Image: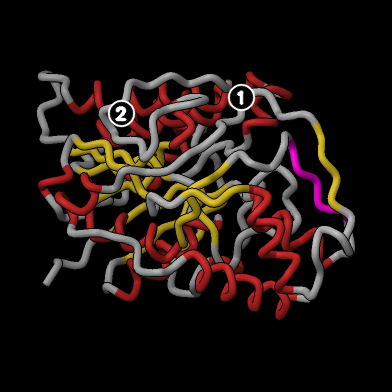
């Protein structure tokens, strides 16, 4: 049985962070969530989790938290939109890269031995071979992907430093398209599945950028949370970069059809508008998950059709 630990989740009041906090508490760990509540919500967190409102770019706040004693940091906080990374590249760099550096500085100052980092499948670039293995060379083509890759390299380069005086064990998860209950239905910059569901619930047109044949690998948030929690005390994952996905791409057109059918519509009976592709968009993404299987014994348990039906049912209940 895993020994109970005190864990800081940055971005802990967000979509993924809230689900992870829930699972860690179920496993009898203590959870501190740091979140600036820009996109996160207190309601995403279980009552037993302690919420500290603050920002990962604020080293003073991080030092104050870690000075209390923390066994591990799960660093999920970040600016998560490719489109917003172009609109405000300075903020993207500050939050994703400088924020990660600040987390690393605080971890080292307070001798925290374990850090898990939320990386991104966008690091692989526009048209990687699919399914994409972690060994595929990085080729970030969006500002967002560049800042996430830079942060990932800071994490792993820091762990390799010989002058730390501690064993600093890190793991990065390159997450594909995470979806599920409690994902924002109103944030137009994140989560294409949740965006489509929110559009239909509000009677708004669905907007598809490019021809709709671009495809994404959708992985359920509970599967993602399980991988993070299982990796906490898994030495096989130390120093590793690990994909989290299903390996099964779903086209945006097929996604729109699924959402519309769930509400009794088709593309012939509901307004669907096509627009030019966004800069930095990947054409097809699908994860090679063999490393997660080998190192963690992990594989996704929630089938995409089941998970999307569950999420749509949750979304209907929110209205």
Q: Residue at x 67, y 58 (%)?
A: 194
Residue tagged 2: 155
Q: Residues within 10 Å of mark 1 (few under 14, many from 20)?
A: some
User: From this viewpoint, is residue 172 visible?
Assistant: yes
Magenta stretch secondary structure, dominant: strand
* Element marked by disc 1: loop
Is 200 covered by the magenta stretch? no
Occupied quadrant, residue 31: bottom left
Q: Mark 1 or mark 2: which is in front? A: 1
- In this rendering, the answer to whether 169 lies above or below 29 is above
In the picture, the quarter occupied by the C terminus is bottom right
| Spatial separation of the CA atoms under disc 1 and disc 2 | 24 Å
Q: Which mark is residue 280?
A: 1
Q: Residues within 10 Å of mark 2 (few under 14, many from 20)?
A: many
Horizontal relation, residue 182 to residue 266: left or right = left
Q: Residue at x 76, y 43 (%)?
A: 208
Occupied quadrant, residue 233: bottom left
Q: Which mark is residue 157?
A: none
Q: Residue at x 59, y 74 (%)?
A: 309
Q: Residue at x 51, y 59 (%)?
A: 51
Q: Position of residue 212 (x, y in %)?
A: 69, 42
Sequence-wise, the earlier of marks 1 and 2 is 2
In the picture, the quarter occupied by the N terminus is bottom left
Total labels drawn: 2
Q: Position of residue 132 (x, y in %)?
A: 35, 36
Q: Which residues are magenta?
A: 205-209
- In this rendering, the answer to whether 280 lies above or below 265 is above
Front-lying residue, 105 or 220: 220
């Amino acid at each position: 049985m895993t020994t109970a630990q005190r864990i800081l989740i940055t971005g802990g009041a967000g979509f993924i962070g809230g689900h992870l906090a829930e699972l860690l508490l179920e496993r009898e760990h203590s959870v501190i969530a740091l979140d600036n509540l820009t996109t996160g919500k207190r309601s995403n967190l279980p009552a037993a989790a302690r919420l500290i409102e603050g920002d990962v770019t604020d080293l003073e706040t991080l030092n104050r938290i870690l000075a209390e004693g923390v066994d591990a940091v799960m660093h999920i906080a970040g600016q998560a939109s490719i489109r917003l990374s172009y609109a405000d590249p300075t903020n993207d760099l500050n939050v994703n890269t400088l924020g990660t550096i600040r987390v690393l500085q605080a971890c080292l100052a307070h001798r925290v031995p374990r850090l898990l980092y939320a990386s991104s499948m966008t690091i692989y670039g526009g048209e990687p071979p699919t399914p994409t293995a972690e060994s595929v060379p990085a080729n970030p083509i969006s500002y967002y992907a560049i800042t996430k890759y830079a942060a990932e390299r800071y994490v792993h380069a820091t762990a390799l430093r010989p002058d730390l005086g501690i064993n600093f064990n890190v793991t990065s998860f390159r997450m594909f398209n995470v979806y599920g209950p409690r994902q924002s239905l109103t944030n137009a910059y994140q989560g294409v599945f949740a965006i489509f569901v929110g559009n239909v619930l509000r009677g708004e047109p669905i907007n598809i950028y490019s021809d709709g044949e671009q495809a994404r690998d959708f992985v359920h948030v509970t599967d993602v949370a399980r991988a993070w929690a299982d990796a906490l005390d898994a030495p096989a994952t130390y120093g590793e970069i690990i994909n989290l996905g299903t390996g099964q791409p779903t086209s945006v057109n097929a996604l729109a059809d699924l959402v519309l059918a769930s509400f009794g519509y088709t593309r012939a009976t509901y307004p669907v508008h096509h627009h030019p592709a966004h800069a930095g968009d990947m054409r097809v993404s699908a994860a090679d998950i063999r490393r997660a299987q080998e190192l963690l014994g992990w594989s996704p348990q929630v089938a995409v059709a089941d998970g999307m039906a569950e999420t749509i049912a949750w979304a209907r209940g929110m209205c």
